[in-house]
Structure formats: C-alpha cells, structure tokens
Image (cartoon, helix red, strand yellow):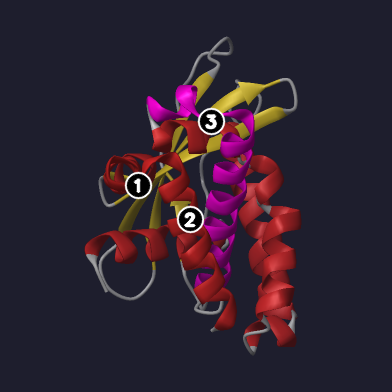
Amino acid sequence: MSLFKQVLAAASLTVAVGFVQAQAPAAATGGADALIKQVSTEVIDTVKSDKAIQSGDVGKIITLVDSKVMPHVNFQRMTASAVGRNWRSATPEQQKRLQDEFKTLIVRTYAGALTQVKDQTVQLKPFRAAAEDSEVVVRTEVRGKGEPIQLDYRLEKSPAGWKIYDVNVLGVWLVEQYKSSFAQEIGSGGVDGLIAKLAERNKAAAKT
C-alpha cells in the first residue's frame, strides 16, 4: 500500500473512532470540536452495536457513512480545492460528475476502514478560536496500539453549521495529496480523463 493510501485509510478509520476521551470543552465559536466529537461518537456507537456492519456489510456501512458523516462535509469545496485551477474551467456538468465520483471514492474508502474499528480512541487537543472565526482547525490525536496518530480537521462555518473540508493525517493534508494526483490525470487526459479515472476506480471498488 502506498503512503498516500495508508494516510487516506488512516484518516477514514480515525474519523470514525469514538471521541469518548475528549477533554476539550465545546468551543465558543459554536462547537466545531463538539461537532467532530458528536459525529464520531454516533458512528462508532452504531458500528459497535450493528453485527452486519461488523461482519463487513458494505452496503449498510455506506448508508451509515452517507447519513451520519457526509452531511457535515463540504464536498464542493473539497473537490474544487483538489481539482485546483481546472475547476473553474470545467463545465457545470463536469463539476457535478467530479464531485459525485470524488464523494463515492471517499465514502467507499471510509466504509472499508470502518470494518477495522476496534478499541481506538481520539483525544481532542486544546482548541482556541474567536467567536467570529469562520474557519478553524480542530486538532486531535488517535490512540490505540502503537504510536499516537495526528489527525486534524479544517472546518468552515456555513449557514447550515460547521462543515469539514480537509483532513490532515500525520502532517499530510488529503486535499493537497489529491491535488497532485488529480493534476497529473488532468495533464494527460483533461478533466474528462480525470472523471473517467475516478469512475473506473469506483467501479472496480464496487465489485470487491
């Protein structure tokens, strides 16, 4: 497994583990850290109580991820950032397809990682932000067997509440990683080439 895939898998797994040891209070900014705690606790509780999910029922896991996690992610911003300057030149249809395929890729990776959830816990690090801040970083640390894993989230305040738009695992921001690989695909096959590549990967993953 490549370093990038290891980082992505780690992010997917650690987003899901329960924040039962969180010690930081809810933020005065409206609770960006409280949101991370809440969503992760709901997901981990469901995973641990559902035998079908524990046995690897991918369909049920995807439904869980789609209903509990994805509403709190700004996929348009995440996709646009990963695609970079080529996003602005893409047609509305291309933008929609990019976002749909990227979401499917992330959901399936996340779902696969959820089957590995055991006894990991996550501790929120001290969180400081002003009430007027519209973008914040929530820093956490995943603890289990082995060395702790750094896991940070970038969130933005929207009319619908706080939304995640990037994740940092072990010092690597995932959007930046995707930006590099997406640029290579666009360079060789254009935006349509990237869409085709993502669709191909998602189709192959659906068969496994």
* Residue 100 in view of the camera: yes
Q: Is residue 144 left or right of residue 15?
A: left
Residue 189's label in the rendered image is 1
Give percent across and percent down for residue 190: 38, 41
Residue at 31% x, 39% y is 176
Q: In this view, does 13 lie to the left or right of 44?
A: left
Amino acid type of the residue tagged 2 in the rendering: Ala
Q: Which of marks 3 and 2 is nearer the N terminus?
A: 3
Few, some or many C-alpha atoms within 10 Å of disc 3 (few <14, some 14-19, many ≥20)?
some
Q: In which quarter of the image is the N terminus?
A: bottom left
Whole-number angstrom distance, CA of label 3 to CA of label 2? 21 Å
Instruction: Report helix, strand or loop for mark 3.
Output: helix
Q: Is residue 61 left or right of residue 185?
A: right
Q: In this view, does 101 lie above or below 85?
A: below
Residue at 62% x, 48% y is 100
Residue at 66% x, 41% y is 72
Q: Is residue 29 above or below residue 45?
A: above
Give percent across and percent down for residue 97: 60, 45
Q: List the residue tagged with mark 3.
A: 77
* Residue 20 in view of the camera: no
Q: Is residue 89 above or below residue 57?
A: above
Q: Give the range drawn in magenta.
A: 85-113
Few, some or many C-alpha atoms within 10 Å of disc 2 (few <14, some 14-19, many ≥20)?
some
Give percent across and percent down for residue 104: 59, 58
Q: Give the dominant element type of the magenta stretch: helix, strand or loop.
A: helix
Q: List the residue tagged with mark 2.
A: 196
